[in-house]
């Protein structure tokens, strides 16, 4: 059975918090080499781009390893969801990269809009404008039942997994 929007977004929040912690710890470890200074072009030069690429690689590795080995991230496991191909097989790395390449801009734009609104850099209209693409993708899932934009682009689907019975 195809997973609904609420479960998918809730699992995304779980994974987002976990990734935030991992990225914060990684950044803190790397700041040991900058004397505690922020990792910016002014403090580390072109190494800032290496840092950004390493953080993106950590995110891709988290999802890629989880989806290609089990079909579930920790957030998805908590909400009993699984990513799979239409035939039920686990996605490959190509599927994962297409899925992330399509989903990341939608989520990052929504997050940027929320942060800009929270810090009063943007008004409510900008917040809505930033969230519309992600909301439209989930509206497509809700109204059509064929998947979100990233499901369609990666030729994968997110399904609910039956709860495993407790050991007797």
Image: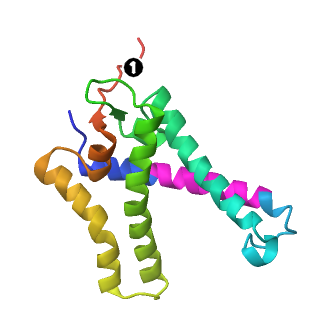
Does residue 11 lie above or below 27 as drawn? Answer: above
Q: Is residue 98 left or right of residue 137?
A: right
- Residue 32: x and y in percent read 85, 61
Report the span colored magenta. Answer: 14-29
Residue displayed at 36% across by 34% down: 82
Q: Specify the quadrant that holds the C terminus.
A: top left
Reading the image, the residue beneath label 1 is 166
Q: Is residue 71 magenta?
A: no
Residue 23 lies in the magenta stretch:
yes
Q: Secondary structure at mark 1?
A: loop
| Lateral position of residue 60 relative to residue 1, left or right | right
Which quadrant would the N terminus be assigned to in this image?
top left
Q: Position of residue 49 (x, y in %)?
A: 68, 64
Q: Looking at this view, is 36 or 40 the one in front?
A: 40
Query: How far across and how far down the image is residue 104, in percent?
Result: 43, 57
Q: Is residue 24 left or right of residue 147?
A: right
Q: Residue furthest top?
A: 168
Residue that appears at 30% across and 62% down: 134
74 versus 111 height, above or below = above
Quarter of the figure with residue 95? top left
Q: Residue at x 55, y 42 (%)?
A: 62
- Quadrant position of residue 43: bottom right
Callout 1 crowding tier (Cα within 10 Å): few <14, some 14–19, many ≥20: few
């Amino acid at each position: 059975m195809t997973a609904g929007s609420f479960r998918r977004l809730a699992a995304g929040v779980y994974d987002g918090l976990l990734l935030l912690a991992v990225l914060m710890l990684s950044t803190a470890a790397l700041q040991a080499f900058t004397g505690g200074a922020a990792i910016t072009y002014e403090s580390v030069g072109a190494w800032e781009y290496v840092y950004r690429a390493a953080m993106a690689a950590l995110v891709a590795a988290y999802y890629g390893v989880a989806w290609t080995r089990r079909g579930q991230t920790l957030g998805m496991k908590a909400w009993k969801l699984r990513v799979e191909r239409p035939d039920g097989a686990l996605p490959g790395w190509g599927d994962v990269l297409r899925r992330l390449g399509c989903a990341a801009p939608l989520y990052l734009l929504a997050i940027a809009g929320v942060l800009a609104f929270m810090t009063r850099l943007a008004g409510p209209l900008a917040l809505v404008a930033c969230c519309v693409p992600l909301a439209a993708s989930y509206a497509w899932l809700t109204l059509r039942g064929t998947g979100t934009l990233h499901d369609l682009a990666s030729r994968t689907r997110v399904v609910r997994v039956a709860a495993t019975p407790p050991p007797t």
